[in-house]
Image (cartoon, rainbow, N blue to C red):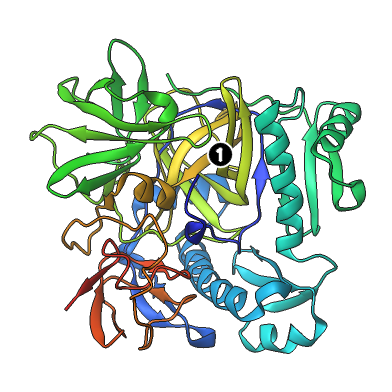
């Protein structure tokens, strides 16, 4: 399971029954600008947006170039503000979401006295009855029950931060009720919703490119990475097992799977031979490649796009985070639920919001003709699991992310602060030393500069 310090609770949680598939995305460049509540967020310039990303957002979200730029800028700002408020509110935090083309941020709390703090930070305050911690504990009980016995006819369950409830989607009410009862959770915090969703497996160095698993099969590259001097890429775990060899989009020998986790999670990494070089790019499919500048997670309601080797560019919105999905092979936890479509062969490909890498395609239902629901495996847990560094335009020496909390000898103090969004090149002080940011991200508790060489370089 992923280190809890990598979990972004500002986004909602969810679970689903899915078959696996390959998808990919593209993004844009950004620079740091000041935001509310002492946060920083990347600004959006017209020149930094990929033409392919703009075209996909216009087709799928009905946004012209200016509207897309405005929305992405608002979503960057909202992610930074939400992270800061989550830290400030503590146990009363009940989730965050954005809405509308201007990405208006709503932050929920169980404590009415905190409304003024939320409003001052630039968000709309909403007072609700249940904290996110309480709702996530109910969802965790459902996850535990699914690990013992995968539920039949219950494809998805998640925390709905807007409804302030745990939602269980099922083909029948009786199936959902049986699952909830088996988990030992009361029905007071659970809403059962009828669903015809039938997630399926989609599985059939530049994000979005095709690669071929020998002796057969095709998936999509997620994001280029390094591990020390070794180059490679992250992708979906269901695409291959350790030792599976791959050919690239040009059908030439490429590399082999070095690590693969599936089920439980759905991530893997492929080490490539010396003919392949990690680049901070995602395939724009005829619209120009997109540059990856960081990996800051977006909030619920934010726009997200993908670029896959079967269907190219498609966009939608983030619906829930920390989703659990039940495949025929077993339950997957920690994926993100989206309204983006996908088809077989898109599995493993890149999901991106603006220029910020979000994750790799896991699976979904529907298709890109009639629409569908797709799930992606967040990127940060994969980087942590295998000690990988994301290739970004900011450069930096490859280093290994932490797999534990900071050591007791790590001394606090300085300008670094959890909940702040840092851009590539930003400098902070911590423990009497100065550090430079290597990858754009929103700082989490435990990601101190001294403990996370993948994100910070001592100068």
Residue beneath label 1, please? 375
Asked whether, in this view, residue 22 is left or right of residue 440, the answer is: right
Say if 137 sits above or below 334 in the image. below
Say if 42 sits above or below 48 in the image. below
Q: Residue placed farthest to the top in the image?
A: 215
The local crowd at label 1, few if under 14, some if 14 to 19, many if 20 or more residues have their Cα within 10 Å, is many
At which x and y percent is residue 355? 37, 58
- Look at the image and tell me whether residue 37 can be seen: yes
Numbered marks: total: 1
- Look at the image and tell me whether residue 347 can be seen: no
Q: Residue placed farthest to the front in the image?
A: 408
Residue 115: name its quadrant.
bottom right
Which of the two residues, 42 or 348, is positioned nearer the viewer here? 348
Which of the two residues, 419 or 119, is positioned nearer the viewer here? 419
Residue depicted at x 80% and y 59%: 164
Q: Residue placed farthest to the left in the image?
A: 274
Residue depicted at x 76% and y 50%: 138
Residue depicted at x 24% and y 51%: 280
At which x and y percent is residue 134? 76, 60
Asked whether, in this view, residue 176 is left or right of residue 383, the answer is: right
SS of the residue at dot 1? strand
Say if 256 sits above or below 185 in the image. above
At which x and y percent is residue 12? 65, 55
Tell me the quarter of the image containing the C terminus: bottom left
Residue 182: name its quadrant.
top right
At which x and y percent is residue 413? 38, 88
């Amino acid at each position: 399971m992923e280190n809890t310090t990598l979990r972004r609770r500002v986004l909602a949680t969810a679970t689903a029954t899915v078959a696996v598939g390959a998808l990919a995305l593209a993004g844009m460049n950004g620079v740091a600008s000041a935001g509310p509540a002492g946060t920083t967020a990347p600004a959006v310039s017209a020149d930094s947006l990929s033409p392919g990303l703009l075209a996909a957002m216009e087709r799928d979200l009905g946004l012209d170039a200016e509207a897309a730029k405005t929305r992405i800028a608002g979503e960057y700002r909202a992610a930074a503000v939400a992270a800061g408020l989550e830290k400030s509110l503590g146990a009363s935090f009940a989730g965050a979401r954005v809405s509308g083309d201007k990405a208006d941020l709503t932050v929920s709390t169980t404590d009415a006295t905190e409304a003024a703090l939320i409003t001052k930070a630039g968000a709309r305050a909403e007072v609700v009855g249940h904290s996110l911690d309480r709702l996530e504990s109910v969802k965790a009980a459902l996850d535990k029950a699914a690990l013992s016995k995968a539920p039949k006819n219950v494809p998805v369950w998640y925390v709905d931060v807007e409804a302030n409830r745990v939602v269980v989607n099922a083909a029948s009410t009786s199936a959902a009720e049986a699952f909830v009862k088996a988990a030992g959770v009361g029905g007071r915090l659970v809403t059962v919703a009828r669903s015809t969703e039938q997630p399926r497996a989609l599985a059939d160095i530049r994000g979005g490119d095709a690669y071929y698993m020998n002796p057969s099969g095709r998936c999509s590259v997620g994001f280029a990475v390094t591990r020390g001097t070794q180059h490679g890429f992250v992708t979906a775990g269901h695409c291959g097992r350790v030792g599976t060899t791959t050919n690239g989009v040009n059908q030439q020998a490429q590399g082999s799977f070095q690590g693969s986790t599936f089920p439980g999670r759905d991530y893997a990494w492929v080490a490539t031979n010396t003919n392949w070089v990690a680049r901070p790019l995602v395939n724009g499919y005829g619209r120009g490649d997109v540059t990856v500048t960081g990996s800051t997670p977006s909030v619920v309601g934010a726009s997200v796009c993908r670029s896959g080797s079967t269907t190219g560019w498609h966009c939608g919105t983030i619906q829930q985070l920390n989703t659990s999905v039940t495949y025929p092979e077993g339950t997957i936890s920690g994926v993100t639920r989206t309204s983006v479509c996908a088809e077989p062969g898109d599995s493993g490909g890149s999901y991106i919001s603006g220029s910020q890498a979000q994750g790799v395609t896991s699976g979904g239902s529907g298709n890109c003709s009639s629409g569908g629901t797709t799930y992606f495996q967040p990127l940060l847990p994969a980087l942590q699991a295998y000690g990988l560094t994301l290739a970004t335009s900011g450069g930096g020496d490859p280093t290994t992310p932490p797999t534990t909390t900071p050591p007791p000898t790590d001394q606090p103090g300085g300008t670094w602060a959890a909940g702040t969004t840092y851009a590539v090149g930003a400098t902070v002080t911590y423990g009497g030393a100065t550090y430079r940011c290597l990858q754009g991200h929103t700082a989490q508790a435990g990601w101190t500069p001294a403990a996370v060489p993948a994100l910070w370089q001592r100068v």
